[in-house]
Amino acid sequence: LTNTEGLTSELSDLDKKHLIHPVAVPKHHASKGPKIIFSKGDGINVKDLNEHTYIDGVSMLWNVNVGHGKKELADVAHHQMSKMAYSSTFYGYGNEPAIRLAEKISRLTPGDLNTVFFTSGGSESNDTAFKLSRFYWQLKGFKDKRKIISLRRGYHGVTVSAQRATGIDAFRNFSGSTDPDIVNAKAHLTECELGDKTHPEYSGCIRSVIEELGADKIAAVIVEPIQGAGGVHVPPEGYLKAVRALCDEFNILLIADEVICGFGRTGEMFGVSHWDITPDLMSIAKGITSGYAQLGGVVMNDRVADTIKEYNDILPHGFTYSGHPTACAVGLKNIEIVEREGLVKNAYKMGKELEKGFTYLEEKHEFFTNPRTVGLLAGFDLMKDPVVNIPFDSSVQAAVSVVEECYQRGLLIRCFDFEPGMNIVAVAPPLIIQKQEIETIISILDEAMTAFS
Ligand code: PLP
């Protein structure tokens, strides 16, 4: 055994013994151990302990937007940690990075989303958005407006309320947790939000849920501008505008979960900008620090913020790491890099390259279908016969196989198969990616699909 092989084997044994991994199969893991033990990253590439290189085709968890190994971010963290690594924002205490980052976010976000409540990640942001929405209505004298409507295939995280808002059954029902005030609309990005009551899925869409529950019981609707972990689903044209109008019509707040879309991933700074809408609250995380530190937040519009700012008692909500100075300093530097390196524009341009590559793959591989790319948030389906809409039967595991073939060839991507017949593959590389690297991803996908067929 070489030194690194010895280390890999030692760590693998320790991992099997002492760790439960998120979103992995515990039994499989306990016998096989970690699939890769990462040790380094540089640009769009990551390495394991044995110096084996992989292209990070999904930016880890759609978050490493500026790419791996950015020394500037390490330096800013080092600088802040050396001065004062942590101070609390409870009891009205402040710190410069949190204040400056809140101001920066208010300038970047659309409309009058001007006020931030910091969290440590996406799930906490969504739970916070739900609580603040309900609190807003309480302050306005509408104590019954408590319910939150979410969508099928939406993913909002794993804290109890975020989990119940997630429209993927395995997550939603895990461990029997409940929150009776979260209602998952059963329709999925269907045009019936545009007002067509004769639409076959009307009874499951947001409008019909509002009619059924009564607007006086509903605090907010939460949507991802583009659904990510539900399988990269882009809403139909006019959909988000219609949901915004619906919320206005019934006096309900709109929460946009920008945890994946935010900070440039889709070729706009925020996903909602593609459809020119402004939510009342926006959940952010991931791309705010490109994963270099744990940070999230809820950005509120003036209507919500001004009401909360009138509250004359202790606000009993907050996380130890709300406004963490080191995380916020990293967030500020990360946004500076995104702006300085023109990464939002690059995401748009490289998204077009990815789209060309997908067109090539669609022409060549008969089971490749339904490609979608919005900036560098991209996905496609694999079907036995796309022409007549016949999925692979469940014994085939097409998406899992293609992802495994890519892994064998040094490309990390993700698949989704949580509904019968669903075989979706997602591609979402760091926003720094260049044309040649996109071409490498496409040629690996090409080989992987040839190997699968
Ligand atoms: N919201 C969306 C849209 C997400 O994609 C995720 C995570 O993937 C979350 C919320 C949860 O974020 P976190 O894992 O940081 O709690």
Image: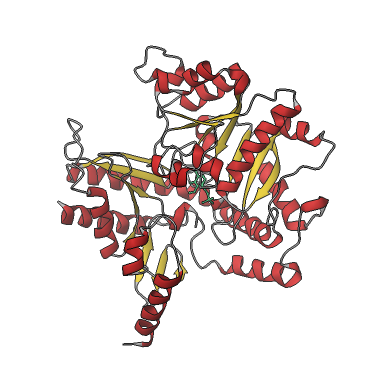
Q: How is the image coloured?
A: secondary structure
Task: Report the residue that reaches farthest toward the right.
Answer: 312
Front-lying residue, 178 or 254: 178
Front-lying residue, 194 or 9: 9
x, y percentage for residue 20? 44, 63
Q: Residue at x 80, y 54 (%)?
A: 94
Compared with residue 62, is residue 133 higher up or lower down, i.e. above or below? Answer: above
Q: Residue at x 70, y 27 (%)?
A: 137
Front-lying residue, 93 or 80: 93
Q: In which quadrant of the rendered image does the N terminus lie?
A: bottom left
x, y percentage for residue 319? 68, 52
Task: Report the residue that reaches farthest toward the left.
Answer: 453
Task: Report the residue that reaches farthest toward the top.
Answer: 198
Q: Quadrant of residue 13?
A: bottom left
Evaluate whether residue 48 shows in this view. Answer: yes
x, y percentage for residue 40? 46, 72
Task: Report the residue that reaches farthest toward the front.
Answer: 176
Compared with residue 279, is residue 336 higher up or lower down, i.e. above or below? Answer: below
x, y percentage for residue 245? 56, 20
Q: Residue at x 34, y 73 (%)?
A: 52
Q: Residue at x 54, y 44 (%)?
A: 160
Left or right: 269 as drawn, with respect to 27: right
Evaluate whether residue 430 shows in this view. Answer: no
Left or right: 278 as drawn, with respect to 209: right
Image mark count: 0
